[in-house]
Image: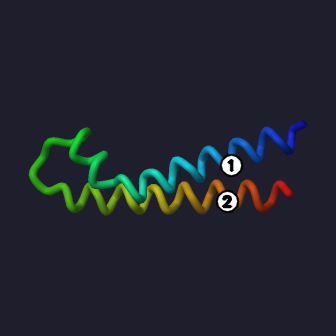
Amino acid sequence: MLQIILILIGLIIALLGVVCIFDARVITKKLFCFGDQNEATMGLKIIGFILSIFGFLVIFFNI
């Protein structure tokens, strides 16, 4: 039962990371209103990449 819960948590974290990567431009337009959105988009993509790696590591080491 604990393995299933950890796998689901890992999948949710990985999904959030992938969504941050692909929708970074749209998210920064909605949340931030300053002029240079390119830096915010790059930061959001880096955070999404790290979240994706962390989520997949949770899944990998749980199995």
Q: Residue 13 placed where, x, y %?
A: 60, 47
Picture quadrant where residue 41 is located: bottom left
Q: Secondary structure at mark 2?
A: helix
Gap in Å between the C-alphas at discs 1 and 2? 6 Å
Proximity of marks 1 and 2: CB atoms separated by less than 8 Å:
yes
Relative to 56, 5 lies left or right: right
Seen at 39% across and 60% down, the residue is 45
Crowdedness near tag 1: few (<14), some (14–19) or many (≥20) residues, C-alpha within 10 Å: many
Q: Residue at x 90, y 36 (%)?
A: 1
Relative to the observer, which residue lies in front, 53 or 26?
A: 26
- Check residue 23 in the rendering and tell me which mark sits there, or answer none: none
Name the outermost residue toward the right. 1
Question: Is 59 situated above or below 3?
Answer: below
Q: For the view shown, which residue lies furthest in the left direction?
A: 35
* Upstream in sequence: badge 1 or badge 2: 1
Residue depicted at 59% across the width and 53% down the height: 14
Q: Quadrant of the C terminus?
A: bottom right
Q: Is residue 36 left or right of residue 3?
A: left
Colour scheme in use: rainbow
Q: Secondary structure at mark 1?
A: helix
Tell me which corner region of the image, top left, top right, bottom left or bottom right, holds residue 51: bottom right
Amino acid identity at mark 1: Gly
- The percent position of residue 3, horizontal first and vertical second, equals 86, 44
Q: Of the residues shown, which amino acid type is indicated by label 2?
A: Phe
Say whether residue 17 is left or right of residue 11: left
* Residue in the picture at 77% in, 44% down: 6
Q: How many marks?
A: 2
Q: Which residue is mark 2?
A: 56
Q: Which residue is mark 1?
A: 10
